[in-house]
């Protein structure tokens, strides 16, 4: 059994998106663009009247997971609903969706939005929604480890045994997610109490990462190349404890960051702080451990690489420049899936909520 190790840790940088909204972007920021099949991961915390008014998507799926507060959505086909804490919306944009995503609670809407690529064959499928309410998401728990199983399977054999013993298992195993994903994927939301440790199987060959929400989590790392992204107006607050700084460079991205990579000892456990993404190397499983007093909360996301060219232009993600030009033209003229886009305005926008 080979355990996966961290190869890179990157801080999610806060930036403005939509209208007046702030997101912490991890996957999709400059240092993390090639994480096939993942295109973007934003941790959003958005209060009214800010939000993400009418915008299109084509060629991928958006997965919106609410942590706190609520979001309302509405699309150009009249599909609408509310995503409440613990609920999840798995939206396959396919050939085209135009929609509006706005906070609907008085407290800020706080959650994660992941963009998962679709392979060429599926880019133009009909749009589809899978909406999971928190109460339908399995949340097995054992030895201080609780997992919300959004996609994939966790604590499988152990829970299966326990269910049998207590004769509570009726029908399909309750800890396997009911989500259908075009791209084979795992999406697990972990809560680890102090001292809890867990070994999670992750299919070999899949791209995998951890994104931390609260507390700290320890994970094995290889002589880790560590990218510390910090605003330039402050000094670098953190250094690779025992590492040698190999390279330091200013990046000319929008909100200028300082990038440092360094090598540490060849085998050690790294402590990951909140709002960081930790990229894992290949292997059959990953060991996660909470050695601190605070409760540790993080998501573990993995997926099978698509291995096709990726051409991204804002909300359109296709395989070539030509297909991007087609998407822009289809959206502009209301063709090939964007028929209902012509003249459509969400209620939120037309009633000038924003
Ligand atoms: C988008 C700019 C955007 N992150 N997190 C450009 F802001 C968006 C967009 C979002 C988004 C929405 C939610 Cl609910 C949460 C997000 C970006 O809607 F799609 C493009 N193209
Ligand atoms: Fe959207």
Image: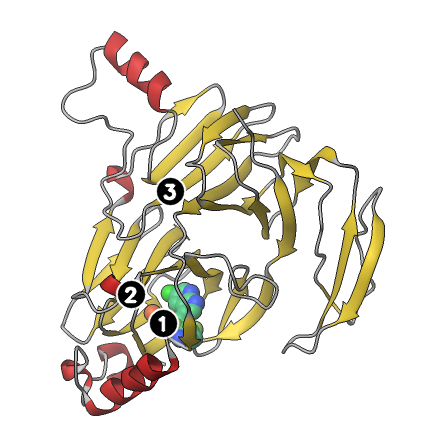
Q: Are marks 2 and 1 in contact (CB under 8 Å)?
A: yes
Instruction: Tell me the quadrant of the picture where the C terminus can be found.
Output: bottom left
Circle nearer the N terminus (3, 1): 3
Tag 2 residue: 120
- From the top left corner, tell me how far across and down residue 65 is, in percent: 37, 52
Disc 2 residue crowd, few under 14, some 14–19, many 20+, Cα 10 Å = some
Circle nearer the N terminus (2, 1): 2
The image's mark for residue 186 is: 3
Tell me the element at label 3: strand
- From the top left corner, tell me how far across and down residue 45 is, in percent: 48, 62
Depth order, front residue of 1/25: 1
Disc 1 residue crowd, few under 14, some 14–19, many 20+, Cα 10 Å = some
Residue 240 shown left or right of residue 278 in the figure: right
Circle nearer the N terminus (2, 3): 2
Residue 173 shown left or right of residue 68 in the figure: left
Q: CA distance from mark 2 to mark 1?
A: 7 Å
Question: In which quadrant of this rendering is ligand 2 seen?
Answer: bottom left
Tell me the element at label 1: loop
Question: Is the residue 277 above or below the residue 138 in the image?
Answer: below
Disc 3 residue crowd, few under 14, some 14–19, many 20+, Cα 10 Å = many
Residue under the image location 37 percent in, 56 percent down: 306
Depth order, front residue of 341/31: 31
Tag 1 residue: 319
């Amino acid at each position: 059994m080979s355990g996966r190790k961290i190869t890179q840790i990157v801080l999610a940088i806060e930036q403005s998106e939509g209208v007046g909204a702030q997101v912490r972007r991890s996957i999709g920021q400059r240092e993390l663009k090639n994480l096939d099949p993942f295109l973007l991961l934003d941790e959003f915390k958005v209060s009214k009247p800010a939000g993400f008014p009418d915008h299109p998507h084509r060629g991928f799926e958006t997965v919106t997971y609410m942590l706190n507060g609520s979001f309302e959505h509405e699309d150009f086909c009249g599909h609408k609903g509310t995503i409440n804490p613990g609920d999840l919306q798995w939206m396959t944009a396919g050939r085209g969706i135009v929609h509006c995503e706005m906070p609907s609670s008085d407290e800020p809407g706080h959650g994660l939005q992941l963009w998962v690529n679709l392979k060429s064959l599926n880019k133009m499928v009909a749009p589809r929604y899978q909406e999971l309410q928190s109460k339908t998401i399995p949340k097995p728990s054992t030895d201080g480890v609780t997992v919300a199983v959004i996609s994939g399977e966790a604590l499988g054999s152990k829970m299966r045994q326990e269910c049998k013993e207590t004769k509570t298992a009726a029908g399909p195993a309750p800890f396997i997610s009911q989500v259908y994903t075009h791209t084979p994927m795992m999406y697990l939301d972990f809560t680890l109490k102090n001292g809890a440790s867990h070994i999670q199987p992750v299919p070999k060959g899949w791209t995998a990462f951890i994104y931390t929400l609260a507390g700290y989590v320890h994970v094995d790392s290889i002589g880790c190349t560590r990218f510390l992204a910090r605003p330039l107006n402050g000094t670098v607050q953190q250094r690779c404890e025992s590492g040698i700084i190999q390279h330091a460079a200013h990046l000319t991205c929008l909100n200028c960051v300082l990038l440092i990579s360094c090598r540490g000892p060849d085998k050690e456990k790294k402590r990951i702080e909140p709002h960081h993404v930790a990229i894992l190397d290949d292997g059959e499983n990953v060991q996660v451990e909470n050695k601190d007093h605070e409760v540790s909360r993080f998501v573990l996301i993995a997926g099978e690489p698509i291995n096709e060219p990726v051409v991204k232009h804002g909300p359109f993600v296709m395989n070539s420049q030509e297909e991007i030009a087609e998407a822009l033209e289809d959206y502009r003229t209301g063709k090939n899936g964007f028929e209902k886009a012509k003249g459509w305005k969400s209620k939120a926008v037309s009633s000038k909520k924003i």
